[in-house]
Image: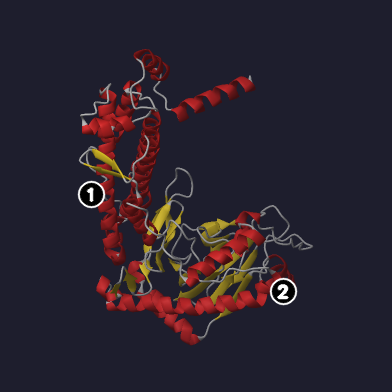
Amino acid sequence: MGKSKKRKLSAEDAAAVSISSKLKKLRGVAKDTKSPPAFHCGKTCASLSPSDGSLYEECLSTSYSGFRHETVSSALSCQFDTSLEGLDSLYQYDVVQPGKFRMTKTSVTRTLVGNPGSTYKYLGLRLFSHPWSDVDERGERQTLRDLGYSEDIASALLTIGRINTELVDRTNTLLKRHVEPLQPVILPANFSLTLINKMEPSSTKKDLKRETLLGGRKISVGWHRDSGLKDFSSICVYQTIKGQELSSSHDWGVALRTTDHGGPTPPLVVPLPSGSLYYMLDDFNHNHEHAVLAGSSGSRYSSTHRVAREGQGTWQYIRDKIASYKLDRQVHVQSGVITFSTSMPLKRRRDVYKKYVRQMLSLQVEIEFEWLRQWYVQGKLHNTLHLYWQKPIQELCDAYCQLESSSNEVMAILEEASESSSTNEGDRRVGAGCVLVTEDLFDLMIEIYSKREETYAIWQERYSDPIFKELPPNQRPRDCPVLDKEDAPRRLSDLVRQLRSRFVGSVVHDEQNGNTKSEKAKIRKKEKRSSGKYTKKEAKGRASNWLKLKADL
């Protein structure tokens, strides 16, 4: 079967690709962005706020020029507020991993809303979005009510989507006015999702951290740059405060600082009233960090609209990747019989078969650890709330099972190759299967299964973290029916051990004619590789370490 035609880009997608190319050519990438001009206070100051008058304004225009804020109309504020409160039942705490080992529960509850099928991954956790528009996939149109959302929640989600369109226009107007005259090319603010947070005041959340740079003020969200976004993409945030007392000792707001923490530029404290919009334009997110200052009363809702990085974070991406694997491959295996789409020499068949195995195993690993485990670690309630995703997750489970079956076929061929010392042309299974087995194929299998075993162990440790006991039972990790079988840990360990054992005893075929090498050559090969049973990559790493050690001595 020939390769399928690549999907033709729409005019909008083609324009986006063109702008991204120009940005990279003319302005580089995020890490290339120069630091903002430094601002010297002329006096010792931990931070500046509007009460510092002209000093604050000068610092804002000099070192924080990409930051803007405004108060919206009462009509827009009313629409936004009603929608954010209408989504209250969707907000959940996240359990994330800000360090390599430590798991922590967020101090805020949140939910993700955006283009159908979008996700957002941060601190090791993938958030799955609720759609802010009706869904039209594969020629089938479904309303949010069709998906099972209640009338109130569906209305709130659609309103967020409509407001997003207005925020795109507002942000692009600011870009054209303040950034475009200074830069050769800018990225339009085509926001694809919003992360909505609900934060409780410091009077309620007693465990909030204090920030010494800000005079000991408590912060709801610590210093950070938003991740997973397109380079040079702008961010627009709406905030509203519900139940705030007029006599509050501290107002909600944001703090800003440059990423060169030891530099002379002081952080800024920006109080923001309810109904505020603030913008971080163009490259501001590249070289600045922001934090959320906790108010002493009232609950803060915020909606952060952003342009997510394209590629591996959507349902459409992983769905199309699975479809491409099924359609575009040159190898077909059925009941142990391997066939190729075209006639080719043995060496070429071996290369094509190895590529097929790598693609299959890599896709299986991606589905397991980037999608299914990310879904099931968030609990039963998460599954109940995310109605759009229930069908895609089932499709991913089905695809995983098909890939598992295919990987078992490869294991069977490797097992037979390790036990056979001939290529009996009358045996169709051996002729088409064992003749394709090479040392490199064993190396590939051992490498991927060993990494899979390591990643599985990390996830099991994550599932058992005591932090989950702080959540209600329906928000704790649950087993995935196709992944978490009783023998899963032992089975993975056994597979790696069996692969290494078969690797040492495998038959090595001559690459020219498919016949086995001489017994003498086979014995030399086995003796060379059997001491420790290392793959080529492992052996190379050990050799490199030894050379480095000798150099150090």
Q: Tell me which residue sits at (67%, 54%) in the image.
A: 260
Is 526 situated above or below 83?
above
* Circle 1 Cα neighbour tier, 10 Å, few/some/many (<14 / 14–19 / ≥20): few
Frontmost residue, 178 versus 460: 178
Q: Which residue is mark 1?
A: 481
Q: What distance separates the C-alpha of mark 1 from that of mark 2?
A: 61 Å
**Element type at marker 1?**
loop
Q: Relative to 275, does residue 111 appear above or below in the rendering? A: above
Q: Write down the residue under mark 2.
A: 53
Q: Amino acid at mark 2?
A: Gly
Q: Amino acid at mark 1?
A: Pro
140 vs 532, nearest the viewer: 140
Within the image, what quadrant is residue 6 found in?
bottom left
Task: Check if mark 1's residue and mark 2's residue have beta carbons within 8 Å.
Answer: no
Other-residue count near label 2 (Cα within 10 Å), few / some / many at <14 / 14–19 / ≥20:
few
Where is residue 301? Give x, y as percent: 45, 71
Q: Is residue 173 visible?
A: yes
